[in-house]
Image (spheres, coloured by chain):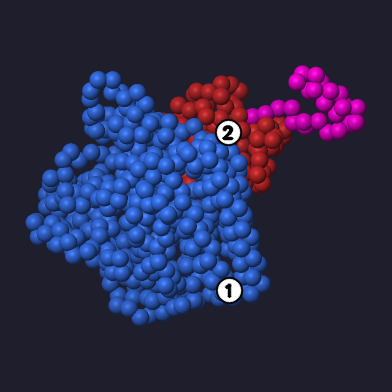
């Protein structure tokens, strides 16, 4: 039993990072995924004996949600994870899933699952004194559809529709992570054309998401002009997506074992021109935000996530980079066309709302440049080629707009035995709860918007 | 101010200009009953400068107590059934329910059987159906405008 913990501790000391944990074999085993900056991955397995597996949460705090999920959905208990609070289980009393906060004048504010705007469903329980947040328990999984379980037994090709259904905002990233996992298991390699098609789709997805997220921060501060401008830009991106792929969220454009996406020279040129036009308008919009003093005053030193906390909590994506964790899966870029990519950083790596907002802006500049190169010429359909070794388990890792998204596929022949999709939103929700501590309750919408995570991606 | 408004009204009448057109408005409350977030993102853009539904008297309100229409997205999950019913019960009458998107209408649902209750009409009486996966802002805007015009 201790061997598993020792192996993980040794791997962490050796530069490996935690990338996910899930129960498999119908709750008979636990599988931990570790990854390195160069893109390599390592799986460690622990047997579950009499429903009990050793915990790793004391050495990897980032595994907290994973272990709680494995308990609620697969009945695995973790020896040493105390208290193992429910995550996906809802039919329990309040005391079982909230952290007790006691003291003079401490009380709770319950928000959701239905929110005041057009927002996904989820429940936040704030423990506050006055307006100061002492602790936040986020309860998601209101939208749990059981997609992973429903996909078991489906063919690998059918699995794509389950992954796509998980989330529209990360539809491409999730689908590419799944396709990479399946192709790794099937021993398929991506030729240059396939890498280019998928990189194009990933960057188009990042483009509208980042523009949307800048607008979301404007909305969080009540800056209507910024909200409107960036909503307009988001709409233009969706129209571009529709023109290129027939779907405004690019859904259905990622296939298994190849790409059917075709663009003739004229379509590519028109798309490239539209990207340049969007870039110009986005730059103007960004300048207006920079010179809007009342807006800028609202952003610094709220929702601070320190680098140490980001590393401890396993934060990923723009949120982690804004805290000084210079990691971006595009640097490794296996199976994709990101040659020579290096992560961007804001001028002020402060881990606050301002840094996370500026992170989006510097990444948008990178995305505009990448798209300019990717749309330089026609695109033809292409198939993956045989090249690797076949395996029972495949892993796919992709940098989505919100960070590292991981997919593990365990197969039996052409069928899915177990599918785990660990999205960047899943990795980052504990960081949102942590960043809110010490700030004021009315700041939370802004802090939340600066992460702009999906609920659907987590709930699945 | 009042004089100005009166003058404007007189001017509009004298010159036979089109009036505010839609003399009515509808307050919308959105409930995500288990969507993939696609309908939410498209619904958000209905208020973008390209469509700007507010100018037709259609706005999203914070509480079901202020709402005329409940806009429901997603197939209803087991965990969202109760909150959805509570939101509906909080609405003043007359009230309408709009099912937004293919999942809310019960098309090609995916998920584990015990976790999905089903389409919105299994839980609430549905008055307006807006198909699409997800329906683009134009389609949402068109359906809501038909509703405010009373042609639905």
Q: Does the magenta stretch include residue A290?
A: no
Residue A392 visible in the shown view: yes
Quadrant in which the N terminus of chain A appears: bottom left
Which picture quadrant has residue A417? Answer: bottom left
For the residue pair A322 and B61, the one nearer the viewer reads as A322
Q: Where is residue A340? Give x, y as percent.
A: 42, 72
Q: Chain letter of disc 1?
A: A
**Residue furthest out toward the left:** A2
Q: Does the magenta stretch include residue B12?
A: yes
For the record, the magenta segment spans B1-26
Who's red, chain-wise?
B
Point 42% across, 55% down: residue: A346
User: Which of the chains bears the disc numbered 2?
Assistant: B
The spot of residue A188 in percent (x, y) is: 37, 76
The residue singled out by tag 1 in the image is A376
Distance CA(mark 2)–CA(mark 1): 42 Å
Picture layout, residue A282 above or below residue A291:
below
In depth, the one of B127 and B92 nearer the eye is: B92
A300 horizontally vs A438: left or right? right
Colour of chain A in the image: blue
Q: Are marks 2 and 1 on the same chain?
A: no
Residue carrying label 2 = B60
* Residue A85: numbered disc: none
Q: In this view, does A350 lie above or below A332?
A: above
The residue at the point 16 percent across, 44 percent down is A81
Could you tell me residue A344's position as x and y percent?
42, 60
Q: Is mark 1 on a helix, strand or loop?
A: loop
């Amino acid at each position: 039993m201790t061997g598993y913990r020792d192996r993980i501790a040794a791997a962490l000391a050796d530069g490996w990072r935690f990338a996910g944990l899930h129960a498999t074999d119908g709750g008979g085993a636990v599988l931990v995924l570790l990854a390195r900056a160069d893109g390599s991955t390592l799986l460690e397995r622990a047997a579950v004996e009499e429903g009990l597996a050793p915990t790793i949460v004391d050495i990897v705090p980032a595994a907290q949600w994973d272990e709680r999920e494995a308990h609620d959905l697969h009945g695995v208990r973790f020896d040493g994870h105390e208290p193992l609070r429910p995550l996906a289980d809802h039919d329990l009393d309040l005391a079982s899933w909230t952290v007790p906060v006691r003291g003079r004048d401490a009380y709770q504010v319950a928000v959701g699952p239905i929110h005041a705007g057009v927002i996904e469903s989820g429940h936040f329980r704030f423990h506050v004194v006055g307006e100061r947040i002492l602790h936040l328990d986020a309860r998601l999984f209101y939208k749990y559809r059981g997609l992973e379980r429903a996909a078991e037994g489906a063919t690998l090709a059918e699995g794509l529709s389950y992954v796509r259904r998980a989330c529209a905002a990360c539809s491409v990233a999730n689908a590419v992570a799944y396709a990479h996992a399946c192709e790794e298991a099937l021993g398929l390699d991506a030729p240059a054309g396939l890498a280019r098609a998928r990189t194009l789709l990933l960057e188009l997805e990042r483009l509208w998401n980042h523009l949307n997220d800048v607008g979301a921060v404007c909305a969080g501060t009540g800056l209507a002009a910024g909200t409107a401008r960036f909503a307009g830009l988001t709409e233009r991106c969706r129209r571009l997506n529709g023109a290129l792929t027939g779907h405004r969220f690019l859904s259905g454009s990622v296939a298994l074992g190849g790409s059917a996406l075709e663009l003739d020279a004229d379509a590519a040129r028109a798309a490239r021109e539209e990207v340049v036009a969007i870039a110009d308008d986005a730059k103007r919009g960004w300048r207006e935000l920079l010179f809007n003093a009342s807006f800028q005053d609202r952003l610094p030193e709220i929702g601070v996530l320190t680098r140490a906390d980001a590393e401890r909590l396993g934060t990923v994506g723009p949120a982690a980079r804004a805290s000084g964790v210079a990691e971006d899966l595009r640097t490794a870029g296996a199976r994709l066309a990101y040659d020579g990519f290096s992560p961007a950083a804001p001028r002020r790596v402060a881990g606050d709302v301002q840094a996370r907002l500026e992170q989006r802006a510097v990444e948008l500049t990178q995305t505009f440049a990448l798209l300019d190169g990717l749309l330089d010429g026609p695109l033809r359909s292409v198939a993956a080629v045989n090249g690797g070794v076949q395996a029972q388990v495949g892993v796919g890792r992709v940098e989505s707009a919100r960070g590292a998204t991981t997919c593990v596929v365990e197969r039996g022949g052409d069928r899915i035995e177990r599918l785990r999709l660990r999205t960047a939103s899943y990795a980052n929700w504990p960081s949102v709860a942590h960043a809110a501590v010490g700030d004021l309750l009315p700041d939370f919408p802004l802090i939340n918007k600066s992460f702009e995570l999906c609920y659907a991606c987590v709930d699945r | 101010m009042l004089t100005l408004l009166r003058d404007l009204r007189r001017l509009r009448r004298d010159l036979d200009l089109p009036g505010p057109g839609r003399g009515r408005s509808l307050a919308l409350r959105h409930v995500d009953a288990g969507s993939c977030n696609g309908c939410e993102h498209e619904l958000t853009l209905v208020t973008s400068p390209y469509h700007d539904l507010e100018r037709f008297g259609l706005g999203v309100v914070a509480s079901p107590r202020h709402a005329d229409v409940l806009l429901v997205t997603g197939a209803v999950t087991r965990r969202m059934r109760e909150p959805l019913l509570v939101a509906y019960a909080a609405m003043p009458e007359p009230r309408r329910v709009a099912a937004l998107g293919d999942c809310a209408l019960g098309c090609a649902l995916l998920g584990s059987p015990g976790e999905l209750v089903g389409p919105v009409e299994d839980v609430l009486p549905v008055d307006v159906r807006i198909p699409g996966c997800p329906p683009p802002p134009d389609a949402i805007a068109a359906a809501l405008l038909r509703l405010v015009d009373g042609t639905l």
